[in-house]
Image (tube, rainbow, N blue to C red):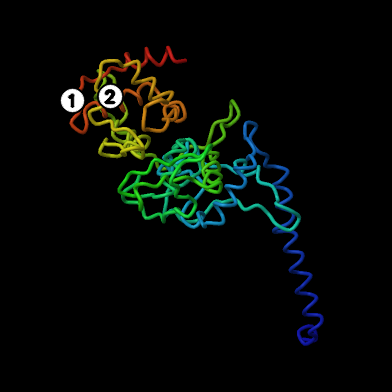
Amino acid sequence: MEFLNNHKTLFWSALILFLFLTLQIAILPAFTNQQIYKPLPDAKPLTKDELAGKAIYVENGCIACHTQQVREVEMDKVFGSRPSIPADYAGNHRMDFWRNTANLLGSERTGPDLTAIGERQPSSDWQLLHLYQPRAVVNESIMPSFSFLFEEKDYLDKGDIEVKVPPEFLKNKFKKIVPTKKALQLVAYLLSLKQTKLPEGIKPQEFLYKKEVKKSAGGGASALPDGGELFTANCASCHQATGEGLPGAFPPLKGSPIVTGDDISVYVTIIMTGYTGRPGYGPMPAVGKNANFTPEMVTAIMNHERSSWGNNAKPVTLEQVKAVMDQLK
């Protein structure tokens, strides 16, 4: 009872116990983790602009709605090719002695996970337009507009990048929308978010609760993946679910002579390696290469596009697509 009645003894006992537990539970495990977990061999450190973009990401509360962690469940497979591992975050270093660099894991997915957004949506044109007005590219989006990161100009200055905004989303149709340095840095950070490949010989953790993969009978006797699902996951954000694209931003696939034409080689090449040079539109990134499309996936997407939105072109075969992709290697 004397122990309980002596406030000094109680205070120092509680303090020593607290410090002991802090050392055992927080400090020593943290040092151990730093020794065990190292960045993956092919991991690239953020550039100066990407680091600045990360700070802008935090500054604007993006972590409140977006996670950066691919869980090991099958439903997360759309966000990355493998579940996230501790090594994915081992490249983060302390800002200084007092401040740690947060791992932006997030806890809520009001918006999609961004772990590999630089691979899923590598178009800087799309990212800029999405920041300026999310509903211009995703009609159902509830994301707020970050138009304060952009300027309205009468004329473009040397070095300016114009954001191709559909007329219905412009306050003044005669103004040019130009991203500020902060907007460009934020996009640079978003485009840097990619999953680093594991070293050769190391298998990634498997996704749990796998769903049955839907097949379609298009493209000959061989069963193909569902072209509609692949289009939705990889193409619809730019070309829209209607295939009509966005005027002045992304070209339509509905009625496109490339989509409905007979030149399979050009069609496959654009999907795999991208395209630059179409007047009035920005460059298309190498969607197929970035997403590691297989010939089966490309065939399924092409047949979906060639038979949707009023398009009525002859289906392509898996053998045709394979022949073109072999030439591209």
Q: Which residue is mark 1?
A: 312
| Front-lying residue, 64 or 198 | 64
- Residue 81 versus residue 71 in the image, above or below: above
Residue 53 at what x, y percent from top left?
57, 47
Q: Residue 259: give its label.
A: 2
Q: Looking at this view, name the residue that lies furthest to the front.
A: 154
Horizontal relation, residue 164 to residue 9: left or right: left
Q: Is residue 113 above or below residue 230?
A: below
Q: CA distance from mark 2 to mark 1?
A: 10 Å
Residue drawn at point x = 60 percent, y = 29 percent? 199
Q: Is 216 displayed left or right of 322 in the figure?
A: left
Which of the pair 272/175 is nearer the observer? Answer: 175
Q: Secondary structure at mark 1?
A: loop
**Of marks 2 and 1, which one's residue comes earlier in the chain?**
2
The secondary element bearing badge 2 is classed as helix
Q: Residue 106 location, x and y as percent?
A: 52, 54
In the visual, does 218 lie left or right of 147? left
Q: Quadrant of residue 286?
A: top left
Instruction: Judge from the rendering whether residue 316 lies leftward or rightward of residue 125; answer left or right.
Output: left
Q: For the residues labelled 2 and 1, say whether their Cβ atoms are less than 8 Å apart.
A: no
Residue type highlighted by circle 1: Asn
Mark 2: which amino acid?
Val
The x and y percentages for residue 41 are 65, 32
